[in-house]
Image (cartoon, helix red, strand yellow):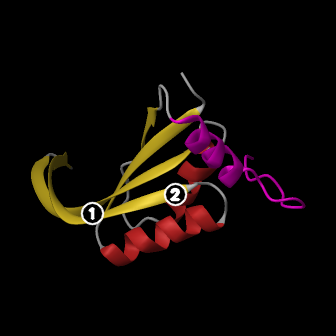
Amino acid sequence: MTDKIVVLVTCGSAREAKRIARALVGQRLAACANILRVPLESVYRWKGKVESARELLLIIKTSRQRFPALRKEVQRLHSYDVPEIIALPVASGAPGYLAWIAESVRPAKGQRSLLR
């Protein structure tokens, strides 16, 4: 098992997905965020009713250490009251790719850690 994770976040629009993705990568909370622009149809229970909505999916690569700050930032930026933020462990991967994730989410020299 690695210390890397993949985080899934659904968004209501392409604009919102891109804004969240750019913020997370810009703040070094994520190494990469893929935006699946093929609309998904989500069916879910909300406030006692079965609802459905068209959404886009963000697939975000980061580390377990950066997840608390990433989750907080997604919650701050997201339009939903309760956004989907699900972290899945990465069991293994190409060593070079895993090292790239680690380097990409390491706070820059002089940058305060956002883990608080």
Asked if 51 appears above or below 87 in the picture, the reply is: below
Task: Check if residue 26 falls in the magenta segment.
Answer: no
Q: Earlier in the sequence, mark 2 or mark 1?
A: 2
Asked if 14 appears above or below 57 in the picture, the reply is: below
Q: Which residue is mark 1?
A: 56
In front of the other: 97 or 56:
97
- In the image, taking residue 2 as reference, residue 17 lies left or right, namely left
Residue 2 numbered mark, or none: none
In front of the other: 55 or 38:
38
Asked if 74 appears above or below 90 in the picture, the reply is: below
Q: Residue at 15% x, 62% y: name it.
A: 53
Q: Amino acid at mark 1?
A: Leu
- In the image, taking residue 60 as reference, residue 83 lies left or right, namely left
Task: Check if residue 97 falls in the magenta segment.
Answer: yes
* Residue lying at the far bottom of the rendered structure: 15
| Numbered-mark total | 2
Give coordinates of residue 109: x percent, y percent.
87, 59
Q: Write the start and end of the magenta stretch as one range.
A: 94-116
Q: Which residue is mark 2?
A: 32
Give coordinates of residue 113: x percent, y percent.
79, 52
